[in-house]
Image (tube, helix red, strand yellow):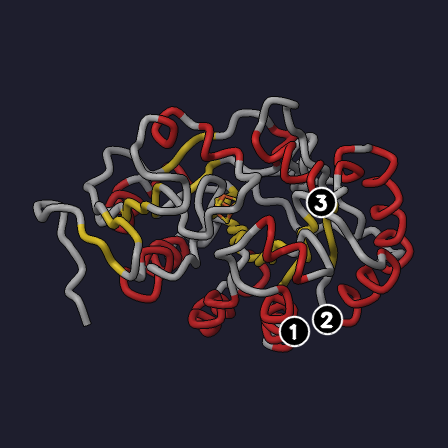
C-alpha cells in the first residue's frame, strides 16, 4: 500500500485523491446559535471525498480558492486528537457535532483513524454528548467504541432519497443507499441511538414506503430538511435537467415530512436527560432551515 503522507511531505495522490495532511491550529468550532442544538462542531478533516454536488462547503473560501474540484482533495488534520485532548476542558456539559463540514467516515478514515481517535478522547469526557453525522457505513468499523458511549452518543445516517439512481447523480462518490440502510440496522441492533437524516431532501420515489423503511430499520427518529439553493448555483441546473426542482418547493418537503410523522408518530427527544445543569433541558437538535425533526 502507498504510504500516507506526513505534513512535511509533498501532497500525495492517493487513489485519485489529493491528500494534503496538516497540523491544524484549532479543532473545535463553537456554535453559538442554540437552535443548532450543539455547542461545538468538530471536523477531523478539511475537504470531503464524497464530493456531493449540492454540498454547501464547496462554496467556502478555502474550497473556492483551490485548483482541484470539490471532492478531489482532502486535508486530514493529523493532530486533531491531540488538539482535542488539549481543549477538553471546554467540553464539560457540551454537545459536539462531528462533523458539519466533512464526512468523518469518508474512505480516508480507514487509513488515518482521526475520527476514531477523536471519539476516544470524547469518551473520556463523561459529561459531553456526541452526534456523529455521516453518509457512510464505514462508521460500523467503530461499533464497539460507539457503543461504549451509551446514551450520550447518537449517529445520524444521512439518507436524502429512497432512490439510489438519484443518489448516483447527486452524491456520485458517496456510499449507495442500501449500504446506509444496512448501517442503520446494524447500529440500531447494537443498541446505538441512530436517526435517519433525510437531508438535504432530494427527489423521493415513494414517501410512505421511504418513511416505513426508516421506521423498520430500527432508527429512533428521523429528520427531513429541505435544500436551500440560489438560482445561480450550478446544482440548480442539475435539478432542472432531471426534473427535480420540486425538492426546492416547501410543500414537497412538507409532504415528505408528513409521511415520516406518520411513520414515527411518537415525538421523542434525542436526549432524555439534560447535558447542562438544570433547570433547562438541552434544545432539540436542529439545523435551522435544514433539519426538521419528525420523530
Ligand atoms: S458528505 Fe457532507 S461534507 Fe461531504 S461532500 Fe457530502 S454534503 Fe459535503
Q: Is mark 2 in CB contact (under 8 Å) with mark 3?
A: no
Residue 151: quarter of image: bottom right
The answer for how far apart the CA atoms under marks 1 and 2 are is 5 Å
Kindly check if marks 3 and 1 are in contact, taking CB atoms under 8 A apart as contact. no
Which numbered marker is on residue 242? 3
Eye-nearest disc, 3 or 1: 3
Label 1 element class: helix
Residue drawn at the location 26% of the way across and 43% of the way down:
83
Q: CA distance from mark 3 to mark 1?
A: 31 Å
Q: Which residue is mark 1?
A: 185
Observer-nearest residue: 58 or 239? 239
Measuring from the top left, give residue 108's x and y in whole percent: 33, 59
Badge 3 element: loop
User: Against 144, is 130 above or below?
Assistant: above
Badge 2 crowding class, 10 Å Cα cut-off, few under 14, some 14 to 19, many 20 or more, is many
Q: Mark 2 sits on what residue?
A: 217
Amino acid at each position: 500500500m502507498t504510504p500516507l503522507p506526513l505534513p512535511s511531505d509533498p501532497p500525495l495522490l492517493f487513489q485519485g485523491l489529493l491528500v494534503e495532511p496538516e497540523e491544524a491550529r484549532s479543532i473545535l468550532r463553537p456554535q453559538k446559535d442554540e437552535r443548532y442544538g450543539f455547542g461545538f462542531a468538530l471536523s477531523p478533516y478539511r475537504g470531503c471525498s464524497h464530493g456531493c454536488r449540492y454540498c454547501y462547503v464547496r462554496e467556502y473560501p478555502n474550497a473556492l480558492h483551490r485548483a482541484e474540484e470539490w471532492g478531489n482533495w482532502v486535508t486530514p488534520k493529523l493532530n486533531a486528537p491531540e488538539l482535542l485532548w488539549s481543549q477538553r476542558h471546554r467540553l464539560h456539559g457540551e454537545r459536539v457535532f462531528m462533523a458539519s463540514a466533512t464526512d468523518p467516515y469518508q474512505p480516508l478514515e480507514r487509513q488515518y483513524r482521526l475520527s476514531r481517535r477523536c471519539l476516544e478522547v470524547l469518551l473520556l469526557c463523561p459529561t459531553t454528548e456526541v452526534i456523529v453525522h455521516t453518509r457512510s457505513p464505514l462508521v460500523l468499523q467503530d461499533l464497539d467504541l460507539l457503543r461504549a458511549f451509551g446514551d450520550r452518543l447518537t449517529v445520524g445516517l444521512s439518507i436524502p432519497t429512497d432512490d439510489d439512481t438519484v443518489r448516483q447523480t447527486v452524491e456520485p462518490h458517496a456510499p449507495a443507499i442500501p449500504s446506509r440502510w444496512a448501517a442503520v440496522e446494524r447500529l440500531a441492533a447494537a443498541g446505538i441511538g441512530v436517526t435517519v437524516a433525510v437531508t438535504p431532501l432530494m427527489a423521493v420515489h415513494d414517501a410512505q414506503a421511504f418513511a416505513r423503511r426508516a421506521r423498520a430499520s430500527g432508527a429512533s427518529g428521523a429528520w427531513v430538511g429541505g435544500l436551500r439553493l440560489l438560482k445561480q448555483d450550478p446544482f440548480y441546473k442539475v435539478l432542472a435537467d432531471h426534473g427535480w426542482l420540486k425538492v426546492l418547493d416547501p410543500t414537497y418537503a412538507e409532504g415528505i415530512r408528513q409521511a415520516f410523522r406518520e411513520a414515527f408518530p411518537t415525538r421523542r427527544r434525542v436526549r432524555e436527560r439534560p447535558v447542562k445543569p438544570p433547570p433547562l433541558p438541552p434544545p432539540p437538535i436542529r439545523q435551522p432551515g435544514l433539519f426538521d425533526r419528525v420523530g
